[in-house]
Image: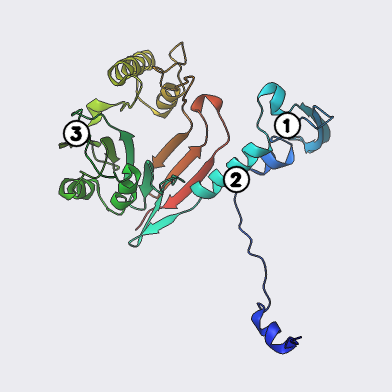
């Protein structure tokens, strides 16, 4: 029988090993008043009573109570949704860096790419699926379109983004439409159909950009009609009108509405970027805009 050497065995063990802790910034109230509730069928209690003491404007303390029902009955978020919520907050609140340039962009967990983002120069880019002009599909494996966006977000100006696109070989990518914005500059739109690329330096007339695999032409027509209807009714273009458009169901809430709901797919997130002279603010909510779900806001100070 071989006797173990105690001193050598101890040397193999980590010294002063402490578990790592990751901090995710979230809205505190969502975790304290029971917004995320368990929905197991084994639970005997089908509702949860919450009582809190709150302080009024004049300093008085009053008791507040609420009854929360699990999602199994009324569609409220459960603890599984809480895990997804924490994961989304971790993704969105992180300021990333590439070639020395800071940027904010939600990263796709499947392919590592992004579909929208803004950088420390106030340049913002959004990517949509495009339409293939040719019915022929190239052989070989395509590169995820989302991987292109972080590569472009290192550019300090809209002009340089367009120059990078023009010089790039886009054949590894499926068709896409790309919108680039910079404060004080007209928006530019790039379209790649799998064969040719076209860069439109004055792309405001393309607003709103629309993408759909259901009925590309029909969906584009209906959503632009809805946009014009809301714009004519409001009389001016501002942030509130843009949000009203994005959460609109066009009276139906189907594949043709801006906030899309189909039996096999739906709008799953909402992103909002606001840039001023000092910072860029990125807001992201992991649900349809019509749900008004809690999201995460990240502020990126602009480079001086």
CA gap, disc 3 and disc 1: 51 Å
Label 3: which secondary element: loop
- CA neighbours of label 2 inside 10 A, class few (<14), some (14 to 19), many (20+): some
Compared to residue 86, the image places residue 236 above or below, namely above
Residue designated by label 2: 86
Q: Which mark is residue 39?
A: 1
Q: Nearer the viewer, mark 2 or mark 3?
A: 2
Compared to residue 101, the image places residue 72 above or below, namely above
Q: Residue at x 38, y 47 (%)?
A: 113
Tell me, yes or no, if residue 276 can be seen here: no
Give the image location of residue 247, x and y in percent. Answer: 47, 23
Give yes or no for contact between labels 2 and 1 (Cβ–Cβ under 8 Å): no
Residue closest to the far front: 1
Q: Is residue 241 left or right of residue 25?
A: left
CA gap, disc 2 and disc 1: 18 Å
In the rendered structure, which disc, 2 or 3, sits on the residue that comes first in sequence?
A: 2
Compared to residue 128, the image places residue 123 above or below, namely below
Give the image location of residue 270, x and y in percent. Answer: 46, 33
Residue designated by label 3: 202
Residue placed most toward the observer, 250 or 108: 108
- CA neighbours of label 3 inside 10 A, class few (<14), some (14 to 19), many (20+): few
Q: Residue at x 20, y 27 (%)?
A: 135
Label 2: which secondary element: helix
Q: Nearer the viewer, mark 3 or mark 1?
A: 1
Q: Is residue 245 left or right of residue 173?
A: right
Give the image location of residue 165, x and y in percent. Answer: 20, 46
Q: Nearer the viewer, mark 2 or mark 1?
A: 1
Give the image location of residue 141, x and y in percent. Answer: 29, 45
Q: Which mark is residue 229?
A: none
């Amino acid at each position: 029988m071989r006797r173990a050497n105690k001193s050598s065995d101890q040397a193999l063990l980590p010294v002063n090993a402490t578990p790592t802790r990751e901090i995710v910034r979230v809205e505190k109230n969502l975790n304290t008043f029971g917004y995320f509730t368990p929905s197991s069928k084994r639970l005997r209690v089908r509702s949860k009573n919450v009582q809190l003491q709150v302080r009024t404007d004049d300093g008085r303390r009053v008791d507040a109570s609420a009854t929360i029902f699990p999602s199994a009955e009324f569609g409220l978020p459960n603890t599984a949704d809480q895990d997804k919520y924490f994961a989304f907050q971790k993704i969105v609140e992180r300021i990333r860096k590439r070639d020395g340039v800071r940027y904010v962009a939600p990263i796709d967990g499947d392919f590592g790419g992004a579909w929208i983002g803004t950088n420390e120069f106030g340049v913002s880019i959004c990517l949509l699926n495009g339409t293939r002009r040719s019915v022929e599909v190239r052989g070989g494996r395509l590169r995820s379109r989302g991987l292109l966006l972080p590569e472009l977000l290192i550019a300090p100006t809209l002009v340089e983004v367009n120059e990078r696109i023009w010089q790039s070989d886009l054949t590894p990518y499926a068709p896409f439409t790309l919108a680039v914005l910079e404060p004080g500059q007209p928006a530019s739109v790039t379209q790649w159909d799998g064969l040719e690329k076209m860069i439109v330096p004055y792309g405001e007339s393309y607003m709103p950009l629309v993408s759909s695999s259901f009925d590309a032409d029909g969906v584009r027509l209906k959503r632009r009609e809805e946009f014009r209807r809301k714009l004519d009714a409001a009389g001016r273009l501002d942030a509130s009108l843009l949000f009203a458009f994005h959460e609109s169901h066009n009276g139906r809430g189907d594949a043709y509405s801006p906030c899309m709901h189909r039996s096999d797919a739906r709008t799953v997130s909402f992103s909002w970027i606001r840039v001023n002279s000092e910072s860029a603010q990125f807001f992201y909510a992991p649900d349809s805009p019509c749900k008004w779900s809690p999201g995460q806001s990240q502020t990126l100070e602009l480079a001086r």
